[in-house]
Amino acid sequence: MELLNRRVIFVLGKGGVGKTTVAAALATIGARKGLRTLVMETDPRAPLAAALAARRSFDPVEASPELFTMVLDGTRALEEYLALVVPGRMVVHAVLRSRLYQFFVQAAPGLRELMTLGKIYYECSRKIGRRNAWDLLVVDAPASGQALALLRMPTAASATFRASVVGQEAENISKWLRDRKTCAFLTVATADSLAVTETIETDSALAAMHLALGAILFNRSMRTGYSDSDVKDLLRGSTNDHERRNLDHLAEIARAGLSRGAVSARAQARLRSATSAPVIEAPELAAADGRGLISALAESLASRLYREPDRRVSRGGE
């Protein structure tokens, strides 16, 4: 698996599957490999930044060596875009304060979504001198339905605005998303049946947009390492009533683990049969805090998601 050899990774998934933690872990892996990494989140509350002990910011802010975070906001991205294309700061401020502009932003379907993707596209192509500003971008996308609407927007905008400036920019973003050497899409799933169903539906939706799902990360995977016969052997070893009661309690816990492991295995089998994407297991981890969990998950996933490339040479420019 060479997922982290791409320039941009979009992390998708149903709410509650650990998507934000996975995005933070992927960014942590990249930074530890010496890649200048920016992780972008769409939740205005900035839970990812908080987990990395960084401050909430709409501009890149350093969380640790080589690792930066920022919050994506479509309205702010639109204002930045206007500042680039409208001459004169006073004119821009007048436009932003006008009631007509506020109505336009609220009424124009998908405009903020397009600007959100435009901001990611801009950061991907931005350079400092002759080198890329970032070696790796990780995007903690919104929940699956909203994320898919976000990804559909460039194609819709390109068809709507056609040869205009906005239409051309939308076409550029659409081509960029379909470039499999640059952009990768990873979906996070768990054994929950709704999460599995949503992952399968996401795979189909991406395929319809000519976007390939690079991998499915099966989070909180349960593998027991023992069988029901091992539990029975344990109970056979009891010699008195007191010991028997303790062993019965342990056996109950062990069988619950076997049940969870079976559910996990069935969910993974369903994903493998319904999609063509590789399924990568991430074990359930019992870290004490957010940053500890991110670090532990990064260590668990690093060897499976990353192969040493000649990426750092590219920082001199492409």
Image (cartoon, rainbow, N blue to C red):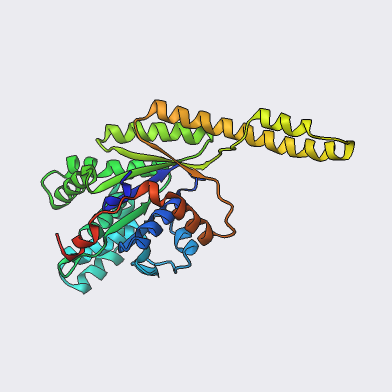
Q: Nearer the viewer, residue 248 or 112?
A: 248
Image point (62%, 35%), residue name: 226
| Residue 119: % across, % down | 27, 57
Q: Would you say 279 lies left or right of 113 here?
A: right
Q: Is residue 72 visible?
A: no
Image point (13%, 52%), residue name: 165
Q: Residue furthest top?
A: 273
| Residue 71: % across, % down | 38, 61
Q: Is residue 313 visible?
A: yes
Q: Nearer the viewer, residue 266 or 230?
A: 230
| Residue 288: % across, % down | 59, 59
Image point (29%, 60%), residue name: 77
Determine which quarter of the picture holds residue 65. bottom left
Q: Residue furthest left?
A: 163
Q: How many marks?
A: 0
Quarter of the image that includes the C terminus: bottom left
Q: Nearer the viewer, residue 153 or 255?
A: 255
Q: Nearer the viewer, residue 247 or 269?
A: 247
Quarter of the image that includes the N terminus: top left
Determine which quarter of the picture holds residue 100. bottom left
Q: Would you say 183 lies left or right of 162 here?
A: right
| Residue 44: % across, % down | 43, 59
Q: Residue furthest right?
A: 241
Q: Is residue 56 above or below residue 262?
A: below
